[in-house]
Amino acid sequence: MKESHHKKVVEPKVEVEAAIGKNPSPENPSKLHGLKLSPVKTWAAGIPGVIATLGDLIEEKTFFRGNKALLKMNQFGGFDCSGCAWPDPDDERSAVGEYCENGAKALAEEATTKRITAEFFKNNSVYDLAQLDDYRIGKMGRLTEPMYLPKGSTHYQPISWDDAFKKIAEHLNALETPDEAAFYTSGRTSNEAAFVYQLFAREFGTNNMPDCSNMCHETSGTALRPTIGIGKGTVKLDDFYESELIVIIGQNPGTNAPRMMSALEKAKKNGAKIIAINPLPEAGLMGFRNPQQLNGIIGHGEKLADLFLPVKINGDMALLKALELLLIDFEKKSPDEVFDHEFITKKTVGYDAFIKQFDKYTLEELAATAGVSPTAIYEAAQMLAFKKKIIVCWGMGLTQQPNGVDMIREILNILLLKGSIGKPGAGVCPVRGHSNVQGNRTMLINEKPTDEQLDRLQNFYGFNPPRKHGYDVVRAIKAMHEGKLKFLFCMGGNFLSAAPDTTYTASALRSLNLIVSVSTKLNRTHLVHGKEAIILPTLSRSDIDMVNGERQIISTENSMGVVESSKGMLNPVSDNLINENQIACRMAMVTLGNKSVVDWQRYHDSYDSVRDAIEKCIPGFENYNERLRMKKGFYLPNAARDGEFNTEQFGDRAPFTLTEIPNNYLEEDEYMMATTRTHDQFNTTIYGLDDRYRGIKNERRVVFMNPKDIDKAGFKAGDKVDLFNYDDGIERVAPLFIIVSYEIPERNTVTYFPETNVLVSVNNVVKDSNMPASKYVKIKIKKHNPGIS
């Protein structure tokens, strides 16, 4: 039953009108806020970042509480930021603050004193709340007690923890097969909680463990593992300070990993050069004003990119091959000075076939396909040619393209030619998103576990874990549609807003018998639900986690393989919250009962006991509890970092990979669209409506276009338009966007997610990794039709 469109939605202590369009869409509401434009920035951070940080703490009514917590965030003995996975310095950490603007915003969201209670849900129907955009939904405050939405009900109602677990167990035990359940994981989940969570899923009988890696860096692991023997990066933070050249491709440090700019600044001061490759000239690629240094406060800061290559969307492969073509020519002119032939002979395979392919390419054709001038490519090749300490960093600008796996392997081809991997100052650096997304995969959150991993679990616990591969995110969504999945448990995250093909995914979620969400805050997945839904509120990273009267530590793994402790220091907003580890254990105890061979109560009562088990089941965690309590934590083994490539097919050698250049054909009225985040956003969490570096204020529904494209199509900057995608013969529409003229390659456009996830077909995926190809979406742009807003 739908509630009145005119009912007011009550925010804790504040009343606001529901944001309702003429045809409200609970899964993707469209409403403009009032766009204002400001000059595009050519540098990131500085005093504006400090002001924005303080403003967010004030908005969340946590100025003093939040500032106190910031002094402990990312510090030795403190708590790990719940934002990105960029590593902390191994030795010295800033006494002023070891966090960035976006980390502070993440902390403000956790430390907020705004609370959502049962009274809030009593006063506001699910339907009315769903009319709000994701920004307003996320600003309601922290969840404080378990809530349950019965079948056919319009409002969530309180439920006790015991009854919630009984309800979950009833649904799980009623399934015809364990494979009718899926267990999703967000990157925020600790190592300990992730381990017991996957352990329960496997003892229950399924490998259906889709996780956020399936939407961000699955492509990286898929590309790296068969090539260098490990699906992770190979560099440490100190390698940046030794590097001669750092290449950043398809990644925006200023917004996605702001603390990375400090490492780039130090690398530049040590003599490194930086090449930035991206369709947009992002502020965080161009310059950095460090707010902890005088030059960053009253000076001009540090110039970052020495060379910027404005590649077309998916023109990266042509650009990489153009660089290789020139490097081959340089090597012919200066034998043994450009390529490391000793490394190639001893450590690689397939060199001759790799070199031969370049007979069919010309620099002019490759440059035209890439959208970058031959002169600029030549300059980049010169910077690469006579250096060996080279680091290449990438983000979702590569991983979310259909040929992302091949492009990462093409990057590896360059590094293998140069011998620039497995030595100080050189290697690969996939810049991970969420703060423990890499740790989750290490803890066996993986729908495709290896037999070796499952054997260890079986040998230690005595039960036989399932061997059949499970569903990743895309396959899980399709399985829901096909009636093969009936139960979804989400350990964190916002599944609907993160997933592709929003309307299709929403329909899939509504088909489920039960969705359970472990969350700190309200999000859209709570409002576009199955026949029944349960929300389980949990502790945040910054919260004090007390178990049996003792303050606990958890652990996380950053993007460079360092495992560190994290200890919260804020009093929780409610006495009715329990940690994720205990949620998984209680679910296991009630669901499995006496059938289980695992001592779940022991794990429920002691993180140390969980870590003892991890030590027995996962290599690299020897003396886990002891080493975790060391000041700096510890590095996990990484053979490729040490110059050893343990590949399944080629033994101790890394293969050169033969790849193809894609045909990116567009119809005359088509554009290529890539989705991105704003600077006021982390993944699906929307902190505000501004994108300061790109000059956007008070709006998210914008489409960045080249001015020539705007003129040619008969539009003007500021026009309202609708965006369409026609993959699979289906019309998908994202209504009511505003055109913004921007410095972007012709026929390319950029929009923000999750607003345009609705245009990303569930079948538009990355080859081999099966990730949504959200950086490669063909769209048409039409004048706005008010009838579809």
Image (cartoon, rainbow, N blue to C red):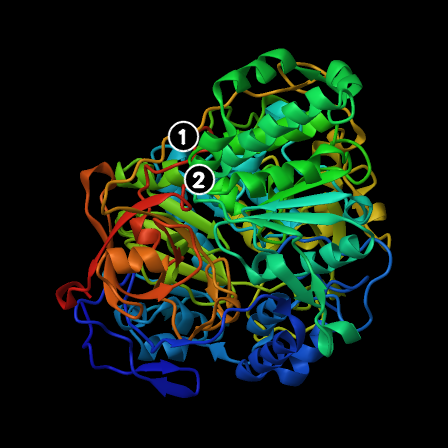
Q: Is residue 467 left or right of residue 646?
A: left
Residue 454 visible (yes or no): no
Could you say whether the residue bearing mark 1 is in a helix, strand or loop? loop
Q: Is residue 107 left or right of residue 114?
A: right
Q: Position of residue 97 (x, y in %)?
A: 75, 70
User: In the rendered image of this protein, does residue 384 appear above or below residue 146?
Assistant: above
Q: Residue 258: which quarter of the image?
A: bottom right
Residue on which disc 1 sits? 662
Q: Is residue 535 left or right of residue 422?
A: left
Asked whether the residues under the numbered discs 2 and 1 touch, taking CB atoms below 8 Å apart as contact, a structural biologist would say yes
Whichever of labels 2 and 1 marks the residue nearer the N terminus, that label is 2
Task: Report the amino acid beneath label 1.
Answer: Pro
Q: Residue at x 63, y 71 (%)?
A: 104
Residue in the foreground of this view, choosing between 105 and 301: 301
- Could you tell me which quadrant the N terminus lies in? bottom left
Q: Position of residue 558 (x, y in %)?
A: 69, 49
Task: Report the amino acid beneath label 2.
Answer: Asn
Q: Residue 89: which quarter of the image?
A: bottom right
Residue 208 visible (yes or no): yes
Residue in the foreground of this view, choosing between 308 and 445: 308
Could you say whether the residue bearing mark 2 is in a helix, strand or loop? loop
Residue on which disc 2 sits? 314
Q: Residue at x 54, y 19 (%)?
A: 358
